[in-house]
Amino acid sequence: DAGITQSPRHKVTETGTPVTLRCHQTENHRYMYWYRQDPGHGLRLIHYSYGVKDTDKGEVSDGYSVSRSKTEDFLLTLESATSSQTSVYFCAIKPGQGDTGELFFGEGSRLTVL
Amino acid sequence: SQKIEQNSEALNIQEGKTATLTCNYTNYSPAYLQWYRQDPGRGPVFLLLIRENEKEKRKERLKVTFDTTLKQSLFHITASQPADSATYLCALDNTGGFKTIFGAGTRLFVKA
């Protein structure tokens, strides 16, 4: 158990509303990631963080922002949700220095935008 | 652009046989390659990692090969069991390793 908690686990919202997903870890790992998973596309990296207040974009970052004010929390925000952002969102951490090694994933947050 | 290809068609095999899954990539020079297992409704779980200078790696009934010339990895499950039924994801990391990219996965069904 990598001590990763995602919240909420399920959310239904309407187009145009803001949404924030939270990833919480208990082991002070430096590297944290947000992915989305869609049928036929697999996991795609949205944003990642390599420390408090240090974040960078992934391959599908448009429409998303992130914040990391504490080591343990990595927040993903959809400022104005669209139907194309309906997806399953996974948070992950990478132990160590981040230059090698596996990812540990949370259980996912299923978001439906109507 | 960087691309990882895994067979999108499900693989159906009989219990006890060896399952072989393929991962091909283009426009990428990975420092290492990983395989993950994902069950429905769950997050992916790490299985094996192989580095660019390694040809083969084994863990119990799992074997991974990595051919950087062919830009291909093969993932084998020997003596497969129904409990091995899941989606298997291939993932690549470049030198630096800050961004891991994933293939779409191959669904494996093992029939008793």
Image (spheres, grey):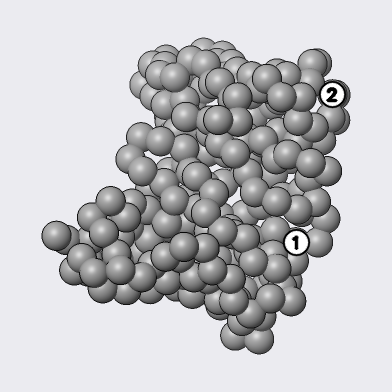
Relative to residue B82, is residue B3 depicted above or below? below
Residue A112, numbered circle: none
In the image, is residue A48 above or below residue A74? below
- Asked if residue A2 lies left or right of residue B87, the reply is right
- In-front residue for pair B102/A29: A29
Q: Position of residue B89 (x, y in %)?
A: 47, 56
Side of B58 relative to B30 (left or right): left
Residue A49 visible at all? no
Amino acid type, mark 1: Asn
Numbered-mark total: 2
Name the residue tied to disc 1. Answer: B94
The subunit carrying tag 1 is B
Task: Kindly state the secondary structure of the residue where label 1 is placed.
Answer: loop
Query: Which numbered circle lies on residue A52?
Result: 2
Q: Could you tell me which residue is drawn at 60 percent across and 31 percent down?
A: A2
User: Mark 2: which amino acid?
Assistant: Val
Where is residue A63? Give x, y as percent. Answer: 62, 31
The residue positioned 78% from the left and 45% from the top of the image is A98
Q: Quadrant of residue B62?
A: bottom left
